Image (cartoon, helix red, strand yellow):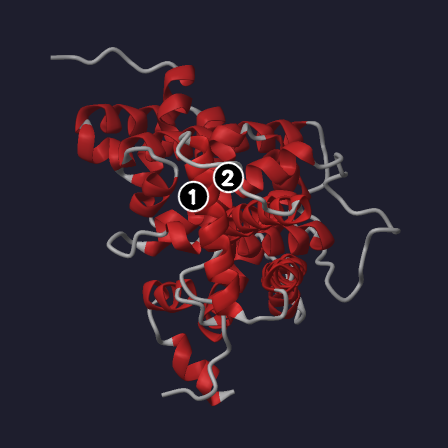
Amino acid sequence: MTESPLTCARVRVLLESYVDGDLERDDPMQSDAVREHLAGCADCRRQHHQAVSVPFRLKALASPPPRESLVGDVMHAIAPSRSGYRRAWTLIAPEAILATFILWYLSGLDGLSSIASGIFGDLQGLVGWGSGTGPMPSVPRVDVLLLISLIALAAVAGYHLSVLIRLAPSTLPTRRTARE
Amino acid sequence: MSDVRAAAALPAAQLVRQAAGGDLDAFEELIRNLQRRVYGFAYQHLRDPDEAHDLAQEIFVKLYRNLARYDAERPFDPWFWKLAANTAINYRRKRIPMPAEPTEETAAPEHQLPAHDPALVEALSQLDPAYRMPVLLHYYADLSLEQVGLSLNLSVPAIKSRLHRARAQLRNSLAESDESGAPR
C-alpha cells in the first residue's frame, strides 16, 4: 500500500495541525507523510520552522502593565450613573410640593379629615349628578380644576415612581464599612 | 492593602454576585483581579496604550452595567470574555484608524513598549476579526480552548481550526515579510 506523496501546498495547509500534534492523533499516516515531505523539501522545512515559532512569538509579544489609574478611572466612570439615579429621585420633590399646595388649598385649613370628606362629598355629588339621581353639585370651579390637577399629578408621580423602581438595581451600590 | 490581597483569592463568580448586590468594594476587587489580562488583551487588539486604556475602561463599565444579567449558575470567564470580545470588536469598528506603530506625538514614554517583533505585530493587525479574536483570547487573555469556544459560541474543533488558520496566515505574512527584507 503506497501513499501518493503530498504536494508542498497540501503540506503547508497541514503544518499547524502537524505542529500541535493533532494530525498525529487524528491521522497518523498523513502525519508520517508530512514528516517525510519535510525531510526532503527545504522550502517546506523553512515554513515548518516558522510554524513552530509563531506560537512562541505570539506569547513573547509583551504588553505594558495597565496604568495605576485604571481601577480608579473605572470606579469614577460608574459613579455618575449612581448619583444620576439619586438625582432622578429629586424630580419627585416638585410634584410633592405641588400636591401639598393643592391639598392645603382644598382643605380650607380644616385638616386632612375635611379634605377627605370634602373630596368624598364632591365625588358623591358628581356621581349622583352623572347618573341622573341628583342635581348638579355646587362645587366651586377652581376646586374642580385643582382636584383634576391633583389626580393628574398623582398619576404622573405614580408613573415616575414606577420608572424609577424599574431602573433601580437590586440594591443601591454601597461601600462596605467593614470586611469580614 | 492586605484586605485586597486576601480578597484576590475570592472566586470571580462570588465577587460578581456581591457586586451585583450593590457591593462596590467587591466590584473594585473584581476589576483589580482582571485588569492585567483585560489590558493585555486590549493592548494587543489596538497596539496603542491610550486606546487600550479606554477600551479596558469601556469593558469594565459595560461589565458593571450588565452585572444583573450574569447567571451565577454558569462560569464567569466565558460570559465576561464574550462581553469583552464584543466590546473590543465594536470599539475597533468605530474608532479612527491609527497606525500600528505609534507616532512621536502619541507615544507616552512611561507606557510605551518597543515593538520588538514589528513583523508579527503588523501581521496580527491584518488578521480578519474572525481569526484575530480567538488568538487574542487564547494568547493574551490566557483562556483555554474550551473557554475561547464558550466565549465565542463555537465548538473546540472550530476554535482549533480558526487558530490554525490564523497561525497559517501569520506564518505566510512573516514569510513574505522575510522575503521582502522587512526588519524583524
Q: Residues within 10 Å of mark 1 (few under 14, many from 20)?
A: some
List x then y, in percent, for residue B177: 66, 31
Q: Chain of mark 2?
A: B
- Report the residue at 36% width, 88% height from top: A180
List x then y, in percent, for residue B154: 33, 33
Residue A53 visible, this angle: no
Q: Are dots 2 and 1 in contact, CB under 8 Å?
A: yes
- Report the residue at 53% width, 31% height from top: B129
Which label number is shown at residue B82?
1
Q: Secondary structure at mark 2?
A: helix
Which label number is shown at residue B86?
2
Q: Is B98 placed left or right of B16 in the picture? A: right
Residue A161 visible, this angle: yes
Q: Is B154 placed left or right of A108 in the picture? A: left
Q: Nearer the viewer, residue B120 or A79?
A: A79
List x then y, in percent, for residue B43: 62, 51
The image quarter containing residue B3 is bottom left
The image quarter containing residue A9 is top left
Q: Chain of mark 1?
A: B
Q: Is A36 placed left or right of B174 in the picture? A: left
Report the amino acid beneath label 2.
Answer: Asn
The image quarter containing residue A110 is bottom right
Report the amino acid beneath label 1.
Answer: Lys
Q: Residues within 10 Å of mark 2 (few under 14, many from 20)?
A: some
Q: Nearer the viewer, residue B182 or A116?
A: A116
Q: Secondary structure at mark 1?
A: helix
